[in-house]
Amino acid sequence: MSADDANRRWTQSMPEAYERHLVPVFFRPFASDMATRAAALRPRTILELAAGTGALTSALVTEAPTASVVATDLNEAMVTAGSAREPRADWRQADAQKLPFEDGGFDLVLCQFGVMFFPDRPAAYAEVRRVLAPQGRFLFSSWGPLDSHGFGAAFQAALEQSMPEASPPFLRDVPHGYTDPAVVAADLAAAGLTLVGSEEVTLEGAAESAASVATGLLTGTPVSAALQAREDVQDLRAAVTQRMTDRLGNGPVTASMTATVYLAQRPA
């Protein structure tokens, strides 16, 4: 199998692992919080970026039933999975740095745990500004440092113990690599958006087992792509799973997770 074929198979299978093992634990608790914040802004037209399989989308259409919701993701497989799970929203495949929407078409843009993945955040934020109506709002979140996420920290420690010579730095560098509010404010300002406020939010995640979370992170994130070419990939996955279980315990497990929620606004 070629590298391209292997990557395509991983990309197509990722939503299943992501939805099964990660969404209930990591994303659904914060989705409820963000949907409540969004509904309080009384939006009429909403654009969601990096919607994944629709954790926030579902909470949003429930909390703001009179608003029209367009949910987007760069990954076609995620859009397919999300549209099947939450058909009340209008789903589109879209690159956040080149949005296929008219100027000023939305009064609220949302993004839960997606901005960290944008290759050029000021460019993506400039697109957000373009599609926002005057005085429209941009509500988004990013994870705090890795050590503030109980599950992520335990997984990365297990990964580094299992392959100390070349452990993938993905979690530390990407999902947990955009943690400084001053940097976020500067990126927004460079795009012509004003940071209105930010709030640190810590919630509890509950998983059926540490092994379930390990499976999700090993197969539902780019960590999988970093391991799949290795001949010892199965042994590595088993070792990481066992070490994570040793750290968090057997059976159902809980851990605290910290994120920052930001609200920005387009000037009039």
Image: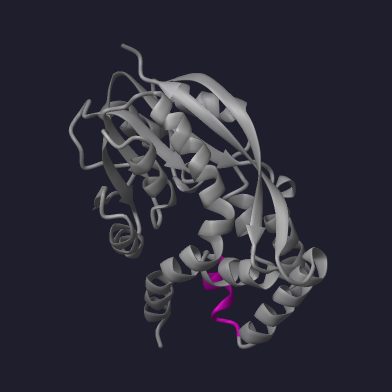
Quarter of image, res 103: top left
Q: Residue furthest top?
A: 268
**Residue sitting nearer the eye, 232 or 86:** 86
Q: Main secondary structure of the magenta part?
A: helix
Q: Quadrant of residue 165?
A: bottom right
Q: Foreground: 106 or 30? A: 30
The quadrant of the image that shows the C terminus is top left
With respect to residue 196, does 98 lie above or below?
Answer: below
Q: Is residue 50 visible?
A: no
Q: Position of residue 181 (x, y in %)?
A: 60, 28
Residue 71, image x and y in percent? 30, 46
Q: Residue at the location (41% across, 74% down)?
A: 13
Q: Where residue 174 sits in the image (x, y, percent)? A: 57, 50
Q: Is residue 252 left or right of residue 109?
A: right
Q: Is residue 204 visible?
A: yes
Q: Residue at x 18, y 33 (%)?
A: 102
Q: Is residue 259 shown in magenta? A: no
Is 111 rendered above or below residue 193? below
Q: Quadrant of the N terminus?
A: bottom left
Magenta highlight on residue 224: yes
Report the side of 193 relative to 45 (left or right). right
Q: Nearer the viewer, residue 220 or 20?
A: 20
- Residue 176's place in the image compared with 190, above or below, is below
What is the basis of the colouring in this image?
A: one colour
Residue at the location (57% across, 25% down)?
Answer: 198
* Residue 236 in the image, given as x and y percentages of width and height: 68, 80
- 129 relative to 96, above or below: above
> What are the residue bounds of the magenta stretch?
223-230
Q: Residue at x 43, y 74 (%)?
A: 10
**Tag count in the figure?**
0
Horizontal side of 116 relative to 63 (left or right) equals right
